[in-house]
Image (cartoon, grey):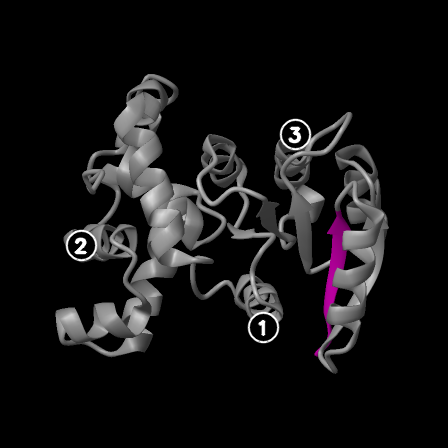
Amino acid sequence: MTIRVLLADDQALLRSAFKVLVNSEPDMEVVGEAADGAEALTLARSERPDVVLMDIRMPGTDGLAATRMITDDPGLSDVRIVMLTTFEVDEYVVQALRAGASGFLGKGAEPEELLGAIRIAHAGEALLSPAATKGLIASFLAQGGGAQAAGEGGGARSERLATLTAREREVLVLVGGGLSNDEIAERLDVSPLTVKTHVNRAMAKLGARDRAQLVVTAYESGLVRPRVE
């Protein structure tokens, strides 16, 4: 199965480099290029990509706004978005994760990291750049992001959390801690398939598109406490 990729970045040279890299893989193809968020939304609707590589900062409609519009579109529910950022720590990345992005990757990442990120996002099995993303969320929420978010739909979030079983809540905490399914399975002495089932059920109950949003929920709800080293 070929992974259909949409590139959204205002730098034509960078898009060209990404296109050559992606098209060099037998299981991937670039189906469109956008120079801003509005164009990315239009192409997402017409081309139905599996994964969008979205620059977070673009003129006009930026990557954050485009991510919200794509993830709010029921017809694009299967589209996964990987945010590209020049900075490893950027508060806008957390907003993008809240908006439905599957994760983020620095533009300085190695080619294999970028290709791996596309495959991971497409599979929906793991959060991209777990350690970096976890640290980013912890840092941002420690500066007040969590408190602000708690006032925005906090009651509805509490109601959804109450629908989780004790095991699903336990798994959510471990997902929020950055553990993979295999690591959680070892910690709980169950099979990875059982963990995947719990993760999928938690996602369904919480209305999360993927693991990235589970991590954000774990922090914003207070189930996982941010630590800034």
Q: Is residue 97 above or below residue 113?
A: above
In the image, taking residue 10 as reference, residue 92 lies left or right, namely left
Comes first in the chain, label 1 or label 2: 1
Identified by mark 1, the residue type is Glu
Viewer-side label of 3, 2: 3
Q: Residue at x 24, y 71 (%)?
A: 183
Pointer 1 local density, CA inside 10 Å: few below 14, some 14–19, many at least 20: few
Identified by mark 3, the residue type is Ala
Q: Residue at x 33, y 48 (%)?
A: 134
Give the overall secondary structure of the magenta segment. Answer: strand
- Image quadrant containing the N terminus: bottom right
Q: How far apart are labels 3 and 1 at the CA level? A: 28 Å
Q: Which residue is mark 1?
A: 112
- The mark found on residue 65 in the picture is 3
- In the rendered image, residue 33, in percent from the top left (x then y), is placed at 84, 51
Q: How far apart are labels 1 and 2 at the CA level? A: 33 Å
Q: How far apart are labels 3 and 2 at the CA level? A: 33 Å
Q: Secondary structure at mark 3?
A: helix
- In the rendered image, residue 100, in percent from the top left (x then y), is placed at 53, 42
- The mark found on residue 170 in the picture is 2
Magenta part of the chain = 1-8
- Residue nearest the observer in this picture, 175 or 9: 9
- The mark found on residue 159 in the picture is none
